[in-house]
Image (tube, grey):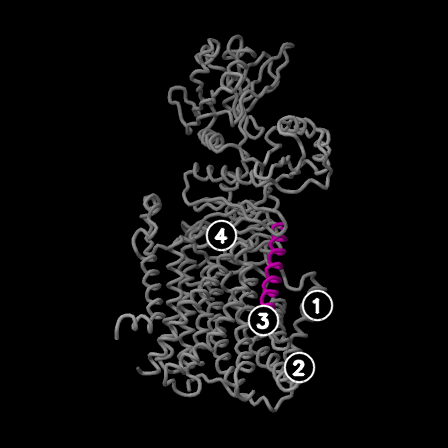
Amino acid sequence: MGYFDVPEIDYTRYTDRQLAAVPLAVLGVALLVLAGSFLLFGTPVQLGMDFAGGTELTVQTTTPEEDIPEAFDEDPESVQAVASPDAENQYIVQFTSTEQEALSEQAEANLEPDGDASVIQQVSSTSASFGQQTQQTALLGIAVAFLGMSVLAFLLFRTFVPSIAIVASAFSDMVIPLAFMSLAGIPLSLGTVAALLMLIGYSVDSDILLNNHILRRSGDFYESTNRAMQTGVTMTVTSMMAMLVMGTAAWIFGVELLASIGIILFVGLAADLMNTYMLNLSLLRWYKFHGVRS
Amino acid sequence: MNPIAFVKEYWRILLLTLFVTAALVALFAPGGVMDDDTLVEDENETVEDNPTNLEYGLGLDGGTRISAPPTGMTADIDIEPGEEREVETTLYEELGIDSSDGIVRYHEDDNRFTAEVFDGDVTPGEFAAALQEAGVDVDEDDVNDGVTQQTRDEMINTIDLRINEAGLSGGNAYQEATVGDGYYIVTEVPGMSPGELRDLLTERGDVQIVAYHPDENGTQTNETVLEGEEFDNVGSASYDDRRDQNYVPVTVDNTEDEDGNSPASEYQAAMNEYGFTSDGMGQCTIHDRETGEFDFDPDNPQWCLLTVVDDEVVDAHSMSPDLGQSMADGTWENDPTFQMIVPTQQDAHQLSVNLQSGALTAPLDFSSEQTYSLEPALADQFKFYSLIIGVLSVLTVSGMVYLRYSDPRVAAPMVLTALAEVVILLGFAALIRMPLDLSHVAGFIAVVGTGVDDLIIIADEVMDEGDVNSQRVFESRFRKAFWVIGAAAATTIIALSPLAVLSLGDLRGFAIITILGVLIGVLITRPAYGDILQRLLTDK
């Protein structure tokens, strides 16, 4: 009916095993990546400043980008230019040290001011022990959210297989973006934790929709599946596009919080498409045709 | 159609209209809806060209935030009422700490006593040993990290006072709980640099007047004669042209206790006893005002009054003849005022702030702090970017929806409904004066995302299997769609509720906005969209 139509997939051509194999393999690879990173670096995902501690300065200076590290006694972790249209000569400089005051002084002393603007536009500094606290709090938050979602899934459907299908694909929806972060070198920050929690909410939407169509409606399995997909894929793709645009725009403007939320949600929603319509679907089909014995 | 039937049929749309109107009023009505306190604040805010009643937080307005836990440890102790002083004194002696670094409190609400020590160098073992020395039965395991709620409340009060005295509005201090039973004290001040705020928080602000005088044997000794809390009335930093002096005018407390003594009378007695008002008048030469240095190994006997802030001598001066005379006569205590002289205007200002706000009960532990600071110029950019990012996201969503349905009758109300949700949320934020930050912007975008998801579910469900030609068919389909939406909303709320409660800085705003948005969506806007769609599709 529109320019963008959801393709109908002929699920009869694939067995449950074949369907489930792909998302499970991807999940396996993701877990391997996280385990490997854990063995190599001690954490599954690189921890950002919010969790590991450190200092980040946003400076406005006419000093060329390559000379910025020389202004500081300590080598910066990274120097990134902010590419937004009306913010020339803005750079985000990150350090592992938490000597926020010393670093600010060095910046003010050694970087050329850009007109009347203050050299230091933004400072954020977290000590290691504060980061440790935040990390525990964030882990607790994710655990509680996941548990709450699982309990709710069971309450909604009151049968084991459909509920566990939702929980499994939500789990995979979170693990795959985490592995992506690990590979792409995106550090775990408060923004990404928010995105992971949002993913629980978003990803369960399409799973509930699919389960609802298949289990609570009359009609042929494949017909129900197709109807659910029409709606569900539209939903997820729309959200993906919104997140992609938000993530890209925010990244260009140097608004990190929004950038990380956008990018992680985009990857997570892509993983959700696969998990919902392959993993969840195969579990449901098995349940519908073989699982219900009465 | 009679009015009752009209309301009955369109109540969902009416409700939406009502909420959007209310939100617009809250957003744009000059002065805001709750105008009691706006009048006061508007005096210094009218210059801002803020077209809405929205308030912005640190992340969109600039300023500095420092979070740090208080230093200290506490132990519950089992003592009889009236023994507090005794235990306190033993603590000071055993641990060799100042009287400001330890306190025994009685907690009325649950009838218990606690002892606290605010010195980072004291170990829990030493603390427990000192308490045992005072006859209290505790061991190391009974000692907890952190300070009592009263101490934190006092600290927050002091910090609030200091921010206000620095002449900055809009700042505030609050506490935030961490996992476990730790607490952070968070201070936010717009328009202050991290260095300035750090100074304001590092200063313990413990002011003492110490009498530096020869004892019976002629050796110089120190005696604390006045402490911060014994001042009754503290003026602001002042300057005396005639004598070229910076000073703070102060009044010493002269309320008498049951023995007829007051801090003022005790101070006066001490001054007379130590000879400040007789031999010692004008006899203080240890302070070289040119270099600002002190010579504590003088040749002649010295009678100096030292102004000590946080164990550091700020100034030393002698008793002035006028003041000394009135003390010798014993009349000073009836009008116990004097001027505390300090070297610079900066010192005078700080001294005044310290005396007025009182000492920070416990120092903050800056080894586990978090600092965030943003220049107002960059904050303005962020405001602008957030707007662009928001608009771009909405355009993307609209574009996708149009591509999918290619029917403006379905797509247009969908986008408008999603926007109505944001407007209602913004109105709500303006109404409760929630300071908006970047995280809230992320929340708004998330709301548009989940909102449109749900509208797609409604649209697909309602248009399922051909045209909707009767009210009954519509209602039943709408109810089916609503089950999914309700379930999805419940999971989003559950997933984000930990963030709304836990102290994860920026994320609380995101979670609160998203949860509110989902609630507004499910209860108000999404049902209304169903009604709009029905009108358009059934061609009534």
Question: Camera-side residue: A230 or B52?
Answer: A230
What residue would you read off at disc 3? A153
Q: Is residue A200 above or below residue A291?
A: above
Dot 1 and dot 2 within a common chain: yes
**Which mark is in front, 4 or 1?**
1
What residue would you read off at disc 2? A21
**Which mark is in front, 4 or 2?**
2
- The chain holding disc 4 is A
What residue would you read off at disc 4? A122
**Neighbour tally class for label 4: few under 14, some 14-19, many 20 plus, Cα within 10 Å:** many
Sequence order check, earlier mark of 4 and 1: 1
Sequence order check, earlier mark of 4 and 2: 2
Distance of label 3 from label 2 (alpha carbons): 23 Å
Dot 4 and dot 1 within a common chain: yes
- Marks 3 & 4, CB-CB < 8 Å contact: no
**Neighbour tally class for label 1: few under 14, some 14-19, many 20 plus, Cα within 10 Å:** some
- Marks 3 & 2, CB-CB < 8 Å contact: no
Which residues make up the magenta segment? A128-154
Which quarter of the rendered picture does the N terminus of chain B lie within?
bottom left
Question: Camera-side residue: A144 or B280?
Answer: A144
- Marks 3 & 1, CB-CB < 8 Å contact: no
**Which mark is in front, 1 or 2?**
2
Sequence order check, earlier mark of 3 and 4: 4
**Residue A135 falls inside the magenta stretch:** yes
Distance of label 1 from label 2 (alpha carbons): 22 Å
- The chain holding disc 1 is A
Dot 4 and dot 2 within a common chain: yes
Q: Residue at x 62, y 83 (%)?
A: A282
Element under label 4? strand
What residue would you read off at disc 1? A36
- Name which residue type carries label 3: Ala
Which quarter of the rendered picture does the C terminus of chain B lie within?
bottom left
